Amino acid sequence: MIRMRELNGYESLLSRIQEKRARIAVLGQGYIGLPLALLLCEAGYHVVGFDINVELIENLTKGRTKFSEPGVEDLIKKCLLSGRYFPESKAEEALKNKDVYIVAVQTPIKPNSKPDLRYLLSALNLILPWIKERYLPVLLVIESTIPPKTMEEIILPLLEREGFFVGEDIFLAYCPERAMPGRLLRELMEADRIIGVIDESSGKLAASLYSSFTRGSVRITHARTAELVKLVENSYRDLNIAFANAIALICEALGVDVNEVRALANLHPRVNILRPGIGVGGSCLTKDPYFLLSSVSNNNVNLSLIWAARKLNEKLPKHAARIITNAIKSRGKSPEESLIAILGITYKGNVRDYRNSPVLELIHELKDEGFRITVYDPLVEEMPEELGEICNSLEEAVRGVDCVVVGAEHPMFLRMDLDEVRALCRENPIFFDGKHVFERKSVEKSGFEYLSVGCPTNVIEILKEIVEHHIYEP
Ligand SMILES: NC(=O)c1ccc[n+]([C@@H]2O[C@H](COP(=O)([O-])OP(=O)(O)OC[C@H]3O[C@@H](n4cnc5c(N)ncnc54)[C@H](O)[C@@H]3O)[C@@H](O)[C@H]2O)c1
Protein backbone atom coordinates (compact mmCIF):
# COMPACT_ATOMS: atom_id res chain seq x y z
CA MET A 1 0.00 0.00 0.00
CA ILE A 2 1.25 3.46 -0.78
CA ARG A 3 0.88 5.44 2.35
CA MET A 4 2.45 8.71 3.40
CA ARG A 5 3.68 8.12 6.85
CA GLU A 6 3.87 11.16 9.02
CA LEU A 7 7.30 11.77 10.49
CA ASN A 8 7.06 11.40 14.27
CA GLY A 9 3.56 10.00 13.81
CA TYR A 10 3.72 8.35 17.20
CA GLU A 11 4.63 11.58 19.01
CA SER A 12 1.96 13.59 17.27
CA LEU A 13 -0.72 10.98 18.09
CA LEU A 14 0.50 10.82 21.68
CA SER A 15 0.26 14.57 22.08
CA ARG A 16 -3.23 14.59 20.50
CA ILE A 17 -4.30 12.00 23.05
CA GLN A 18 -2.61 13.73 25.98
CA GLU A 19 -4.01 17.14 25.05
CA LYS A 20 -7.50 15.69 24.47
CA ARG A 21 -7.39 16.80 20.84
CA ALA A 22 -7.72 13.19 19.63
CA ARG A 23 -11.04 12.49 17.92
CA ILE A 24 -12.47 9.15 18.98
CA ALA A 25 -15.00 6.73 17.48
CA VAL A 26 -16.42 4.03 19.75
CA LEU A 27 -18.00 1.21 17.74
CA GLY A 28 -20.89 -0.42 19.56
CA GLN A 29 -23.03 1.66 21.95
CA GLY A 30 -24.22 -1.24 24.08
CA TYR A 31 -23.56 -2.06 27.73
CA ILE A 32 -19.84 -1.42 27.40
CA GLY A 33 -19.36 0.96 24.45
CA LEU A 34 -21.88 3.56 25.60
CA PRO A 35 -20.54 4.18 29.13
CA LEU A 36 -17.02 4.12 27.76
CA ALA A 37 -17.84 6.75 25.11
CA LEU A 38 -19.49 8.91 27.77
CA LEU A 39 -16.52 8.70 30.11
CA LEU A 40 -14.14 9.65 27.30
CA CYS A 41 -16.39 12.61 26.50
CA GLU A 42 -16.41 13.59 30.18
CA ALA A 43 -12.61 13.42 30.12
CA GLY A 44 -12.66 16.11 27.40
CA TYR A 45 -12.49 14.17 24.13
CA HIS A 46 -14.67 14.61 21.09
CA VAL A 47 -16.39 11.19 20.80
CA VAL A 48 -18.66 9.64 18.21
CA GLY A 49 -20.68 6.71 19.51
CA PHE A 50 -21.30 4.56 16.44
CA ASP A 51 -23.79 1.70 16.31
CA ILE A 52 -25.46 -0.13 13.45
CA ASN A 53 -28.65 -0.27 15.49
CA VAL A 54 -30.49 2.78 14.15
CA GLU A 55 -33.21 2.77 16.82
CA LEU A 56 -30.63 2.67 19.61
CA ILE A 57 -28.85 5.68 18.09
CA GLU A 58 -32.11 7.58 17.60
CA ASN A 59 -32.90 7.06 21.28
CA LEU A 60 -29.42 8.15 22.31
CA THR A 61 -29.71 11.38 20.34
CA LYS A 62 -32.84 12.08 22.39
CA GLY A 63 -30.95 11.28 25.60
CA ARG A 64 -32.59 7.90 26.11
CA THR A 65 -31.32 4.36 26.51
CA LYS A 66 -33.11 1.05 27.09
CA PHE A 67 -30.64 -0.35 29.55
CA SER A 68 -30.60 1.75 32.61
CA GLU A 69 -27.35 1.76 34.52
CA PRO A 70 -26.98 4.03 37.54
CA GLY A 71 -25.81 7.43 36.31
CA VAL A 72 -25.76 6.61 32.59
CA GLU A 73 -28.91 8.44 31.50
CA ASP A 74 -27.83 11.64 33.30
CA LEU A 75 -24.41 11.35 31.74
CA ILE A 76 -25.86 10.91 28.23
CA LYS A 77 -27.75 14.19 28.64
CA LYS A 78 -24.70 15.95 30.06
CA CYS A 79 -22.47 14.70 27.24
CA LEU A 80 -24.99 15.64 24.53
CA LEU A 81 -25.18 19.14 26.01
CA SER A 82 -21.37 19.36 26.07
CA GLY A 83 -21.36 19.12 22.27
CA ARG A 84 -18.59 16.52 22.40
CA TYR A 85 -20.68 13.31 22.24
CA PHE A 86 -22.33 12.36 18.96
CA PRO A 87 -24.42 9.18 18.65
CA GLU A 88 -24.26 8.13 14.99
CA SER A 89 -25.49 5.25 12.86
CA LYS A 90 -23.97 6.29 9.54
CA ALA A 91 -20.49 4.81 9.09
CA GLU A 92 -19.03 7.64 7.07
CA GLU A 93 -20.12 10.36 9.51
CA ALA A 94 -18.88 8.32 12.44
CA LEU A 95 -15.62 6.86 11.21
CA LYS A 96 -14.08 9.50 8.99
CA ASN A 97 -11.09 11.47 10.30
CA LYS A 98 -10.63 9.84 13.66
CA ASP A 99 -7.42 9.42 15.66
CA VAL A 100 -8.69 6.62 17.88
CA TYR A 101 -11.07 3.75 17.12
CA ILE A 102 -12.41 1.64 19.98
CA VAL A 103 -14.31 -1.54 19.11
CA ALA A 104 -16.86 -2.63 21.74
CA VAL A 105 -19.22 -4.82 19.70
CA GLN A 106 -20.62 -8.13 20.89
CA THR A 107 -18.52 -11.31 20.62
CA PRO A 108 -20.95 -14.16 21.38
CA ILE A 109 -20.51 -17.90 21.02
CA LYS A 110 -21.89 -19.96 18.16
CA PRO A 111 -24.36 -22.82 18.78
CA ASN A 112 -21.33 -25.15 18.90
CA SER A 113 -19.87 -23.04 21.78
CA LYS A 114 -17.03 -21.71 19.61
CA PRO A 115 -16.30 -17.95 19.52
CA ASP A 116 -18.32 -15.95 17.00
CA LEU A 117 -16.10 -13.06 15.87
CA ARG A 118 -18.20 -11.94 12.93
CA TYR A 119 -19.40 -8.67 14.56
CA LEU A 120 -15.83 -7.80 15.49
CA LEU A 121 -14.54 -8.51 11.99
CA SER A 122 -17.35 -6.58 10.36
CA ALA A 123 -16.61 -3.60 12.64
CA LEU A 124 -12.93 -3.76 11.66
CA ASN A 125 -13.82 -3.94 7.99
CA LEU A 126 -15.94 -0.82 8.39
CA ILE A 127 -13.07 1.08 10.00
CA LEU A 128 -10.17 0.14 7.72
CA PRO A 129 -11.14 2.16 4.60
CA TRP A 130 -11.34 5.30 6.75
CA ILE A 131 -7.95 4.65 8.31
CA LYS A 132 -6.48 4.24 4.83
CA GLU A 133 -7.97 7.54 3.79
CA ARG A 134 -6.62 9.39 6.75
CA TYR A 135 -2.87 9.31 6.03
CA LEU A 136 -2.18 9.84 9.72
CA PRO A 137 -1.40 7.19 12.31
CA VAL A 138 -4.29 6.00 14.43
CA LEU A 139 -4.80 4.00 17.62
CA LEU A 140 -7.08 0.97 17.26
CA VAL A 141 -8.34 -0.47 20.55
CA ILE A 142 -10.25 -3.73 20.88
CA GLU A 143 -12.49 -3.72 23.97
CA SER A 144 -14.63 -6.70 22.98
CA THR A 145 -13.75 -9.97 24.68
CA ILE A 146 -11.66 -12.17 22.36
CA PRO A 147 -10.06 -15.62 22.60
CA PRO A 148 -6.28 -15.88 23.15
CA LYS A 149 -4.16 -15.19 20.06
CA THR A 150 -6.95 -13.27 18.27
CA MET A 151 -4.78 -10.15 18.26
CA GLU A 152 -1.74 -11.99 16.87
CA GLU A 153 -3.38 -14.49 14.55
CA ILE A 154 -6.50 -12.69 13.29
CA ILE A 155 -6.35 -8.93 13.78
CA LEU A 156 -2.65 -8.31 13.12
CA PRO A 157 -2.60 -10.35 9.87
CA LEU A 158 -5.80 -8.63 8.75
CA LEU A 159 -4.18 -5.22 9.22
CA GLU A 160 -0.97 -6.34 7.51
CA ARG A 161 -2.90 -7.73 4.55
CA GLU A 162 -4.45 -4.28 4.17
CA GLY A 163 -0.95 -2.81 4.01
CA PHE A 164 -0.66 -1.33 7.49
CA PHE A 165 2.48 -1.46 9.60
CA VAL A 166 1.46 -2.07 13.19
CA GLY A 167 3.51 0.08 15.55
CA GLU A 168 4.18 2.61 12.78
CA ASP A 169 1.06 3.80 11.05
CA ILE A 170 -1.51 1.92 13.10
CA PHE A 171 -1.15 1.28 16.80
CA LEU A 172 -3.04 -1.70 18.15
CA ALA A 173 -4.13 -2.52 21.71
CA TYR A 174 -6.48 -4.92 23.48
CA CYS A 175 -8.14 -3.41 26.55
CA PRO A 176 -10.48 -6.06 27.93
CA GLU A 177 -13.47 -4.74 29.76
CA ARG A 178 -14.10 -6.22 33.16
CA ALA A 179 -16.86 -3.96 34.52
CA MET A 180 -20.08 -5.45 35.81
CA PRO A 181 -23.62 -4.37 34.87
CA GLY A 182 -25.21 -2.49 37.74
CA ARG A 183 -21.87 -0.86 38.54
CA LEU A 184 -20.60 -0.16 35.04
CA LEU A 185 -19.74 3.54 35.31
CA ARG A 186 -18.09 3.18 38.70
CA GLU A 187 -16.08 0.15 37.71
CA LEU A 188 -15.06 1.61 34.34
CA MET A 189 -13.67 4.60 36.22
CA GLU A 190 -12.16 2.87 39.20
CA ALA A 191 -11.04 -0.62 38.21
CA ASP A 192 -7.44 -1.38 37.34
CA ARG A 193 -6.98 -1.79 33.59
CA ILE A 194 -4.93 -4.21 31.56
CA ILE A 195 -3.63 -3.21 28.17
CA GLY A 196 -2.44 -5.97 25.90
CA VAL A 197 -0.17 -5.08 23.00
CA ILE A 198 2.28 -6.53 20.52
CA ASP A 199 4.57 -3.48 20.46
CA GLU A 200 5.59 -1.00 23.12
CA SER A 201 4.47 2.22 21.40
CA SER A 202 0.89 0.97 21.11
CA GLY A 203 0.96 0.21 24.84
CA LYS A 204 2.06 3.74 25.72
CA LEU A 205 -0.59 5.33 23.52
CA ALA A 206 -3.40 3.19 24.90
CA ALA A 207 -2.18 3.70 28.49
CA SER A 208 -2.22 7.44 27.92
CA LEU A 209 -5.82 7.28 26.66
CA TYR A 210 -7.11 5.09 29.48
CA SER A 211 -5.27 7.04 32.20
CA SER A 212 -7.26 10.08 31.14
CA PHE A 213 -10.46 8.72 32.69
CA THR A 214 -9.64 5.78 34.98
CA ARG A 215 -8.58 6.23 38.56
CA GLY A 216 -7.28 2.65 38.78
CA SER A 217 -3.83 1.57 37.68
CA VAL A 218 -3.12 0.86 34.00
CA ARG A 219 -0.83 -2.08 33.35
CA ILE A 220 0.69 -2.94 29.99
CA THR A 221 1.34 -6.54 29.07
CA HIS A 222 1.52 -8.77 25.99
CA ALA A 223 -1.73 -9.04 24.03
CA ARG A 224 -1.92 -12.80 24.58
CA THR A 225 -1.58 -12.40 28.35
CA ALA A 226 -4.33 -9.75 28.43
CA GLU A 227 -6.62 -11.97 26.34
CA LEU A 228 -6.05 -14.81 28.78
CA VAL A 229 -6.46 -12.71 31.95
CA LYS A 230 -9.94 -11.55 30.98
CA LEU A 231 -11.09 -15.13 30.34
CA VAL A 232 -9.39 -16.53 33.42
CA GLU A 233 -11.22 -14.06 35.67
CA ASN A 234 -14.67 -15.13 34.50
CA SER A 235 -13.80 -18.81 34.31
CA TYR A 236 -12.56 -18.61 37.90
CA ARG A 237 -15.94 -17.31 38.99
CA ASP A 238 -17.85 -19.85 36.91
CA LEU A 239 -15.81 -22.63 38.43
CA ASN A 240 -16.38 -21.41 41.97
CA ILE A 241 -20.13 -21.16 41.42
CA ALA A 242 -20.08 -24.66 39.92
CA PHE A 243 -18.34 -25.90 43.07
CA ALA A 244 -21.09 -24.37 45.22
CA ASN A 245 -23.71 -25.98 42.97
CA ALA A 246 -21.98 -29.35 43.15
CA ILE A 247 -21.99 -29.16 46.95
CA ALA A 248 -25.69 -28.24 46.79
CA LEU A 249 -26.42 -31.38 44.76
CA ILE A 250 -24.50 -33.51 47.26
CA CYS A 251 -26.51 -31.91 50.06
CA GLU A 252 -29.77 -32.80 48.30
CA ALA A 253 -28.67 -36.41 48.00
CA LEU A 254 -27.68 -36.58 51.67
CA GLY A 255 -30.66 -34.69 53.11
CA VAL A 256 -28.48 -31.85 54.38
CA ASP A 257 -29.12 -28.11 54.04
CA VAL A 258 -26.46 -26.52 51.86
CA ASN A 259 -26.89 -23.15 53.55
CA GLU A 260 -25.95 -24.69 56.88
CA VAL A 261 -22.99 -26.47 55.28
CA ARG A 262 -21.79 -23.22 53.67
CA ALA A 263 -22.20 -21.21 56.85
CA LEU A 264 -20.24 -23.74 58.89
CA ALA A 265 -17.56 -24.50 56.26
CA ASN A 266 -17.00 -20.79 55.63
CA LEU A 267 -16.05 -20.37 59.29
CA HIS A 268 -12.77 -21.95 58.18
CA PRO A 269 -10.36 -19.07 57.52
CA ARG A 270 -9.33 -20.37 54.09
CA VAL A 271 -12.72 -21.48 52.79
CA ASN A 272 -15.20 -19.23 50.99
CA ILE A 273 -17.92 -21.24 49.25
CA LEU A 274 -20.18 -19.06 47.11
CA ARG A 275 -23.96 -19.25 47.10
CA PRO A 276 -25.40 -21.98 44.91
CA GLY A 277 -28.47 -21.20 42.81
CA ILE A 278 -30.39 -21.75 39.62
CA GLY A 279 -27.37 -21.28 37.36
CA VAL A 280 -25.11 -18.63 35.91
CA GLY A 281 -26.13 -15.88 33.50
CA GLY A 282 -25.03 -12.66 31.88
CA SER A 283 -23.13 -12.09 28.69
CA CYS A 284 -19.66 -12.90 30.02
CA LEU A 285 -19.66 -15.78 32.50
CA THR A 286 -21.71 -17.95 30.16
CA LYS A 287 -19.28 -17.65 27.25
CA ASP A 288 -15.82 -16.70 28.51
CA PRO A 289 -15.02 -20.24 29.75
CA TYR A 290 -15.83 -21.47 26.23
CA PHE A 291 -13.46 -18.88 24.76
CA LEU A 292 -10.81 -20.18 27.12
CA LEU A 293 -11.53 -23.79 26.16
CA SER A 294 -11.43 -22.98 22.45
CA SER A 295 -7.96 -21.49 22.72
CA VAL A 296 -6.04 -24.71 23.31
CA SER A 297 -8.37 -27.34 21.91
CA ASN A 298 -5.64 -29.03 19.88
CA ASN A 299 -2.87 -28.93 22.45
CA ASN A 300 -3.61 -32.16 24.26
CA VAL A 301 -4.36 -30.26 27.46
CA ASN A 302 -7.04 -31.77 29.67
CA LEU A 303 -9.51 -28.99 30.30
CA SER A 304 -12.33 -31.15 31.59
CA LEU A 305 -12.47 -29.19 34.86
CA ILE A 306 -13.51 -25.93 33.15
CA TRP A 307 -15.81 -27.79 30.79
CA ALA A 308 -17.50 -29.72 33.60
CA ALA A 309 -18.06 -26.53 35.60
CA ARG A 310 -19.76 -24.85 32.66
CA LYS A 311 -21.91 -27.89 31.94
CA LEU A 312 -22.95 -28.24 35.59
CA ASN A 313 -23.97 -24.57 35.79
CA GLU A 314 -25.90 -24.94 32.54
CA LYS A 315 -27.91 -27.84 34.01
CA LEU A 316 -29.09 -25.94 37.08
CA PRO A 317 -32.22 -24.26 35.61
CA LYS A 318 -33.52 -27.68 34.54
CA HIS A 319 -32.66 -29.10 37.93
CA ALA A 320 -34.49 -26.24 39.69
CA ALA A 321 -37.54 -26.81 37.47
CA ARG A 322 -37.50 -30.50 38.46
CA ILE A 323 -37.45 -29.64 42.19
CA ILE A 324 -40.47 -27.34 41.78
CA THR A 325 -42.34 -29.81 39.57
CA ASN A 326 -41.78 -32.72 41.95
CA ALA A 327 -42.88 -30.67 44.95
CA ILE A 328 -46.12 -29.63 43.26
CA LYS A 329 -46.86 -33.10 41.89
CA SER A 330 -46.17 -34.66 45.30
CA ARG A 331 -49.15 -32.65 46.58
CA GLY A 332 -51.36 -34.39 44.05
CA LYS A 333 -51.62 -31.33 41.82
CA SER A 334 -51.04 -31.36 38.08
CA PRO A 335 -48.90 -28.64 36.43
CA GLU A 336 -51.88 -27.59 34.31
CA GLU A 337 -53.93 -26.65 37.38
CA SER A 338 -51.00 -24.92 39.10
CA LEU A 339 -49.81 -21.33 38.86
CA ILE A 340 -46.22 -20.22 39.49
CA ALA A 341 -45.05 -16.62 40.05
CA ILE A 342 -41.55 -15.74 38.88
CA LEU A 343 -40.13 -12.70 40.68
CA GLY A 344 -37.17 -11.26 38.77
CA ILE A 345 -35.87 -12.50 35.42
CA THR A 346 -32.48 -10.79 35.29
CA TYR A 347 -29.35 -12.85 35.73
CA LYS A 348 -28.58 -11.16 39.03
CA GLY A 349 -30.15 -8.76 41.47
CA ASN A 350 -30.47 -5.02 40.83
CA VAL A 351 -29.58 -5.15 37.12
CA ARG A 352 -31.83 -4.78 34.09
CA ASP A 353 -29.85 -7.13 31.89
CA TYR A 354 -31.62 -10.46 31.39
CA ARG A 355 -29.44 -11.70 28.53
CA ASN A 356 -28.59 -15.37 29.06
CA SER A 357 -30.37 -15.32 32.39
CA PRO A 358 -30.90 -18.83 33.80
CA VAL A 359 -34.36 -17.65 34.91
CA LEU A 360 -35.47 -17.64 31.26
CA GLU A 361 -34.52 -21.28 30.92
CA LEU A 362 -36.19 -22.14 34.21
CA ILE A 363 -39.41 -20.54 32.93
CA HIS A 364 -39.20 -22.47 29.65
CA GLU A 365 -38.72 -25.73 31.53
CA LEU A 366 -41.71 -25.02 33.77
CA LYS A 367 -43.86 -24.09 30.79
CA ASP A 368 -42.81 -27.27 29.02
CA GLU A 369 -44.08 -29.17 32.06
CA GLY A 370 -47.44 -27.48 31.57
CA PHE A 371 -47.39 -24.87 34.37
CA ARG A 372 -49.01 -21.48 33.97
CA ILE A 373 -46.61 -18.67 34.81
CA THR A 374 -46.92 -15.09 36.03
CA VAL A 375 -43.80 -12.91 35.73
CA TYR A 376 -42.90 -9.71 37.54
CA ASP A 377 -39.67 -7.78 37.25
CA PRO A 378 -39.80 -4.10 38.18
CA LEU A 379 -36.38 -3.47 36.61
CA VAL A 380 -37.14 -4.80 33.14
CA GLU A 381 -39.12 -2.41 30.99
CA GLU A 382 -40.00 -4.67 28.07
CA MET A 383 -40.37 -8.33 28.83
CA PRO A 384 -40.76 -11.03 26.18
CA GLU A 385 -44.47 -11.88 26.15
CA GLU A 386 -43.88 -15.56 25.60
CA LEU A 387 -42.54 -15.87 29.16
CA GLY A 388 -46.02 -15.89 30.66
CA GLU A 389 -48.53 -13.45 32.05
CA ILE A 390 -46.51 -10.26 32.51
CA CYS A 391 -47.56 -8.47 35.71
CA ASN A 392 -47.15 -4.88 36.82
CA SER A 393 -47.00 -5.44 40.56
CA LEU A 394 -45.93 -7.98 43.12
CA GLU A 395 -49.52 -8.38 44.30
CA GLU A 396 -50.74 -9.12 40.77
CA ALA A 397 -47.96 -11.65 40.23
CA VAL A 398 -48.45 -13.68 43.42
CA ARG A 399 -52.26 -13.59 43.66
CA GLY A 400 -53.63 -17.15 43.58
CA VAL A 401 -50.30 -18.88 42.88
CA ASP A 402 -49.16 -22.25 44.21
CA CYS A 403 -45.49 -21.37 44.12
CA VAL A 404 -43.44 -18.19 44.37
CA VAL A 405 -39.99 -18.35 42.71
CA VAL A 406 -37.37 -15.71 43.47
CA GLY A 407 -35.38 -15.54 40.23
CA ALA A 408 -33.39 -12.35 40.89
CA GLU A 409 -32.48 -10.81 44.21
CA HIS A 410 -33.76 -7.29 43.51
CA PRO A 411 -33.82 -5.19 46.71
CA MET A 412 -37.62 -4.83 46.57
CA PHE A 413 -38.00 -8.61 46.70
CA LEU A 414 -35.62 -8.89 49.61
CA ARG A 415 -37.78 -6.39 51.50
CA MET A 416 -41.17 -7.93 50.64
CA ASP A 417 -43.50 -8.85 53.47
CA LEU A 418 -43.67 -12.63 53.30
CA ASP A 419 -46.84 -12.77 55.41
CA GLU A 420 -48.62 -10.51 52.94
CA VAL A 421 -47.34 -12.47 49.97
CA ARG A 422 -48.40 -15.71 51.61
CA ALA A 423 -51.90 -14.33 52.23
CA LEU A 424 -52.33 -13.70 48.49
CA CYS A 425 -51.23 -17.21 47.46
CA ARG A 426 -53.28 -20.38 47.32
CA GLU A 427 -53.37 -22.89 50.19
CA ASN A 428 -50.07 -24.35 51.36
CA PRO A 429 -47.80 -22.51 48.88
CA ILE A 430 -44.18 -23.22 47.99
CA PHE A 431 -41.45 -20.59 48.13
CA PHE A 432 -38.53 -21.43 45.84
CA ASP A 433 -35.52 -19.29 46.73
CA GLY A 434 -33.52 -19.36 43.49
CA LYS A 435 -30.75 -17.19 44.91
CA HIS A 436 -30.40 -18.44 48.50
CA VAL A 437 -31.15 -14.99 49.83
CA PHE A 438 -33.99 -15.84 52.23
CA GLU A 439 -33.71 -17.53 55.55
CA ARG A 440 -35.51 -20.82 55.51
CA LYS A 441 -36.96 -20.39 59.00
CA SER A 442 -38.56 -17.01 58.32
CA VAL A 443 -40.03 -18.25 55.03
CA GLU A 444 -41.48 -21.29 56.82
CA LYS A 445 -42.77 -19.07 59.63
CA SER A 446 -44.84 -17.20 57.07
CA GLY A 447 -46.53 -20.45 56.08
CA PHE A 448 -44.60 -21.41 52.95
CA GLU A 449 -42.81 -24.63 52.22
CA TYR A 450 -39.21 -23.51 51.59
CA LEU A 451 -37.38 -25.04 48.65
CA SER A 452 -34.12 -24.27 46.91
CA VAL A 453 -31.27 -25.99 45.14
CA GLY A 454 -29.41 -27.87 47.87
CA CYS A 455 -32.21 -27.53 50.45
CA PRO A 456 -34.14 -30.80 50.50
CA THR A 457 -37.48 -31.03 52.28
CA ASN A 458 -36.33 -33.99 54.34
CA VAL A 459 -33.37 -32.08 55.76
CA ILE A 460 -31.78 -33.52 58.88
CA GLU A 461 -31.88 -31.24 61.90
CA ILE A 462 -30.90 -31.69 65.49
CA LEU A 463 -31.70 -28.26 66.85
CA LYS A 464 -34.69 -26.12 66.03
CA GLU A 465 -32.77 -22.83 66.08
CA ILE A 466 -30.92 -21.25 63.16
CA VAL A 467 -27.24 -21.91 62.50
CA GLU A 468 -25.96 -18.79 64.27
CA HIS A 469 -27.55 -20.02 67.52
CA HIS A 470 -25.68 -23.30 67.51
CA ILE A 471 -22.53 -21.74 68.94
CA TYR A 472 -21.33 -23.74 71.90
CA GLU A 473 -19.53 -21.55 74.37
CA PRO A 474 -17.92 -23.46 77.22
N1 LIG B 1 -21.91 -6.45 29.19
C1 LIG B 1 -20.95 -6.71 30.02
O1 LIG B 1 -21.17 -6.77 31.22
C2 LIG B 1 -19.52 -6.94 29.56
C3 LIG B 1 -18.51 -6.94 30.51
C4 LIG B 1 -17.20 -7.10 30.07
C5 LIG B 1 -16.95 -7.32 28.72
N2 LIG B 1 -17.95 -7.34 27.83
C6 LIG B 1 -17.63 -7.55 26.41
O2 LIG B 1 -17.79 -6.30 25.74
C7 LIG B 1 -18.24 -6.54 24.40
C8 LIG B 1 -19.51 -5.74 24.19
O3 LIG B 1 -20.50 -6.28 25.04
P1 LIG B 1 -21.85 -5.51 25.32
O4 LIG B 1 -22.48 -6.18 26.47
O5 LIG B 1 -21.62 -4.04 25.37
O6 LIG B 1 -22.65 -5.88 23.97
P2 LIG B 1 -24.03 -5.24 23.49
O7 LIG B 1 -24.70 -6.30 22.73
O8 LIG B 1 -24.74 -4.58 24.63
O9 LIG B 1 -23.56 -4.08 22.51
C9 LIG B 1 -22.91 -4.32 21.32
C10 LIG B 1 -23.38 -3.27 20.32
O10 LIG B 1 -22.56 -3.34 19.17
C11 LIG B 1 -23.38 -3.05 18.06
N3 LIG B 1 -22.71 -3.49 16.84
C12 LIG B 1 -22.62 -4.74 16.31
N4 LIG B 1 -21.87 -4.72 15.19
C13 LIG B 1 -21.47 -3.44 15.02
C14 LIG B 1 -20.67 -2.79 14.05
N5 LIG B 1 -20.13 -3.45 13.03
N6 LIG B 1 -20.46 -1.47 14.18
C15 LIG B 1 -21.01 -0.77 15.20
N7 LIG B 1 -21.78 -1.34 16.16
C16 LIG B 1 -22.00 -2.65 16.06
C17 LIG B 1 -24.68 -3.74 18.33
O11 LIG B 1 -25.73 -3.17 17.60
C18 LIG B 1 -24.82 -3.49 19.85
O12 LIG B 1 -25.60 -2.34 20.13
C19 LIG B 1 -18.43 -8.03 24.27
O13 LIG B 1 -17.29 -8.60 23.69
C20 LIG B 1 -18.56 -8.49 25.70
O14 LIG B 1 -18.15 -9.82 25.86
C21 LIG B 1 -19.24 -7.14 28.21
Image (cartoon, rainbow, N blue to C red):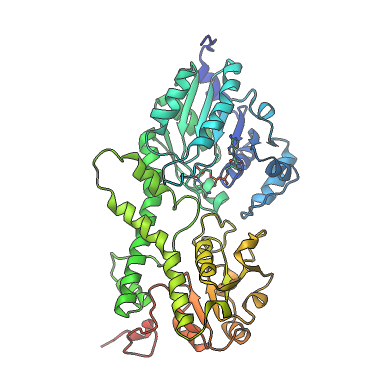
Residue 408 is at least partly visible in this image: no
At which x and y percent is residue 153? 39, 28
Q: Nearer the viewer, residue 468 or 308?
A: 308
414 on left or right of 454: right
Q: Does 273 appear above or below 28?
A: below
Q: Nearer the viewer, residue 469 or 238?
A: 238
The residue shown at (58%, 41%) is: 33
Residue 325 is at least partly visible in this image: yes
At which x and y percent is residue 423? 61, 87
At which x and y percent is residue 51? 64, 38
Residue 226 occupies quadrant: top left
Q: Nearer the viewer, residue 361 or 67?
A: 361
Report the image quarter containing ligand 1. top right
The residue shown at (40%, 25%) is: 199
160 on left or right of 69: left
400 on left or right of 456: right
At which x and y percent is residue 23? 62, 28
Q: Does 331 appear above or below 61?
A: below
